[in-house]
Image: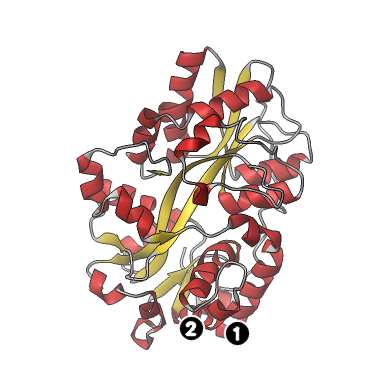
C-alpha cells in the first residue's frame, strides 16, 4: 500500500512493544521449537535446517511461524514458547540488554570458529548472544524501466531532486538501525556517532513519496512502477527476479552497503538448552548454508563455497560481497535503539 508523504509519520511500534498471540507449541525436553518469520523464510528453515537436523540427531525439531520472533520473546516475559529464535542481529542485542536471551562462551558454540569475528554479536562483557547464521546486504533496489544501475552509483543519488516523489523508504523501526547507521558511516560517523547521518536521512526522506509497510508492499511498488527506487534487501530482489519480476533489480553503490546479519538465539528460561545448542552448532554446516543461499540468504561462514550459478546471480563473488559491505556493531546500536527510533520519527516529521 502506497502512502502519501503526509501519512509517513505514523508512529513506529518498537519490536518490544508489539502484541503477540502465542502458538500452542512449546519447547520441551528433547525438542527444538524454533520461531521464524512466516512464508518463504519458514519453509526455508524447515527444508534447509530443521529437517536435516532432526534426521541426523533424532531430536524432534519444529519451526513455528510467528509475526516477529524477537517480539514473541519480549512478550513472553521470561516464559518463552520457543527454545530457538532467528532474529536480526540488532534485535538479539536488544533482547540481551533486557535479559531475555542466553549468553554463551566460544566453548558453547564451537562452530562459530567458521565465522569471522566481525560478525559475532557480543555483549559488553564479551559474551556471545547466539550463532550468527546468514546475511543479506542492503543496497538500492530500482525499477529497470524507470532507471538504471548507473543512476544509483552512489548512495547520495537518493538525495537528488530528480527523484522527488519517486523514492520509498522503510519505517522508523528499521530506518534507525539500518539507514541512519549507514548514512552516518558515509558521512564520517559510525554506529556510535550517528549525528553525521541525520542530514542525509532528512534529504532522502524529502524525496520519499511513501513508507513501505512490508517487504511485499515495496516489491509491488517497484514492480508496478509506483516508485523508482528504495534502499532494500538483496535476498528479496533475488527471489523476486527468480519469480519472473526481472524489471526489478538491485545495485550496490560504490561506497558499499550494510551487512544485515541474522543470529540464532536461545530465549532465557526456555527448556532443553542442550538440544537448542546442538541445533545452533549444526546450522553452520556448509550444505545447510548453501541450501539457504539458494533462497537468498548468504553465508557468513567462510568454509562455504557457493555454486558458480549462485555467484553469477549475485553478480559478484562472496569475497566481494563481504568486502564491499560494512558490518556495524549491532550491540552498540541496540543500546539506545528506542531513542534512535524517536530521532528518526523527528527527522521524518521535519521532512514532510
Residue ranking furthest to the top: 58
Q: Quadrant of the C terminus?
A: bottom right
Residue carrying label 2: 203
213 left or right of 90?
A: left
Instruction: Report whether 262 appears left or right of 70.
Output: left
Q: Residue at x 38, y 37 (%)?
A: 292
Q: Position of residue 57 (x, y in %)?
A: 51, 14
Res 256 quadrant in image:
bottom left
Image position of 96 with respect to 158: above or below: above
Does residue 53 lie above or below 216 as drawn? above
User: Does the CB distance between marks 1 and 2 fall below 8 Å?
Assistant: no
Residue at point 50%, 17% (across, down): 54
Locate residue 1, reporting x and y percent: 47, 63
Mark 2, other Cα within 10 Å: few <14 / some 14–19 / many ≥20:
some
Of 333 and 150, which appears nearest the observer? 333
Identity of the residue drawn at 55% across and 49% down: 88
Rendered residue at 50%/52% (across/down): 118
> Which residue is under mark 1?
350
Q: Image quadrant of residue 306?
A: top left
7 relative to 71 in the view: left or right: left
Callout in the foreground (1, 2)? 2
Q: Is tag 1's residue or tag 2's residue first in the polypeptide sequence?
A: 2
Please name whichever residue, 1 or 39, is drawn nearer the observer in this view of the structure: 39
Q: In whole angstroms, how far apart are the C-alphas of marks 1 and 2?
A: 10 Å
Amino acid at each position: 500500500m502506497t502512502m502519501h508523504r503526509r501519512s509517513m509519520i505514523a508512529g513506529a511500534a518498537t519490536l518490544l512493544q508489539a502484541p503477540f498471540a502465542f502458538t500452542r507449541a512449546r519447547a520441551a525436553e528433547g525438542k527444538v521449537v524454533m520461531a521464524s518469520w512466516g512464508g518463504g523464510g519458514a519453509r526455508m528453515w524447515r527444508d534447509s535446517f530443521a529437517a536435516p537436523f532432526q534426521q541426523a540427531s533424532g531430536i524432534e525439531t519444529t519451526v513455528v511461524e510467528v509475526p516477529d520472533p524477537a517480539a514473541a520473546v519480549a512478550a513472553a516475559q521470561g516464559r518463552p514458547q520457543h527454545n530457538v529464535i532467528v532474529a536480526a542481529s540488532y534485535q538479539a542485542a536488544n533482547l540481551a540488554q533486557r535479559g531475555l536471551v542466553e549468553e554463551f562462551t566460544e566453548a558453547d558454540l564451537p562452530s562459530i570458529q567458521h565465522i569471522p569475528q566481525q560478525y559475532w554479536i557480543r555483549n559488553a562483557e564479551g559474551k556471545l548472544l547466539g550463532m550468527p547464521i546468514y546475511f543479506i546486504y542492503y543496497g538500492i533496489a530500482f525499477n529497470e524501466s524507470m532507471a538504471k544501475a548507473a543512476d544509483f552509483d552512489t548512495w547520495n543519488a537518493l538525495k537528488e531532486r530528480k527523484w522527488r516523489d519517486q523514492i520509498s523508504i522503510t519505517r522508523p523501526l528499521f530506518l534507525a538501525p539500518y539507514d541512519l547507521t549507514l548514512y552516518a558511516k558515509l558521512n564520517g560517523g559510525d554506529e556510535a556517532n550517528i549525528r553525521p547521518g541525520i542530514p542525509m536521512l532528512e534529504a532522502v526522506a524529502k524525496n520519499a513519496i511513501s513508507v513501505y509497510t512490508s517487504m511485499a508492499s515495496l516489491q509491488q511498488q517497484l514492480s508496478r512502477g509506483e516508485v523508482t527506487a528504495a534502499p532494500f534487501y538483496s535476498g528479496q530482489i533475488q527471489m523476486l527476479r527468480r519469480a519472473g519480476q526481472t524489471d526489478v533489480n538491485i545495485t550496490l553503490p560504490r561506497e558499499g552497503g550494510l551487512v544485515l546479519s541474522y543470529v540464532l538465539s536461545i530465549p532465557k528460561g526456555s527448556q532443553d538448552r542442550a538440544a537448542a545448542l546442538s541445533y545452533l552448532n549444526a546450522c553452520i554446516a556448509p550444505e545447510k548454508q548453501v541450501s539457504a543461499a539458494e533462497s537468498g540468504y548468504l553465508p557468513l561462514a567462510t568454509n562455504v563455497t557457493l555454486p558458480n550459478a549462485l555467484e553469477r546471480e549475485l553478480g559478484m563473488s562472496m569475497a566481494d560481497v563481504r568486502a564491499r559491505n560494512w558490518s556495524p556493531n549491532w550491540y552498540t546500536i541496540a543500546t539506545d535503539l528506542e531513542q534512535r527510533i524517536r530521532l528518526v520519527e523527528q527527522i521524518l516529521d521535519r521532512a514532510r
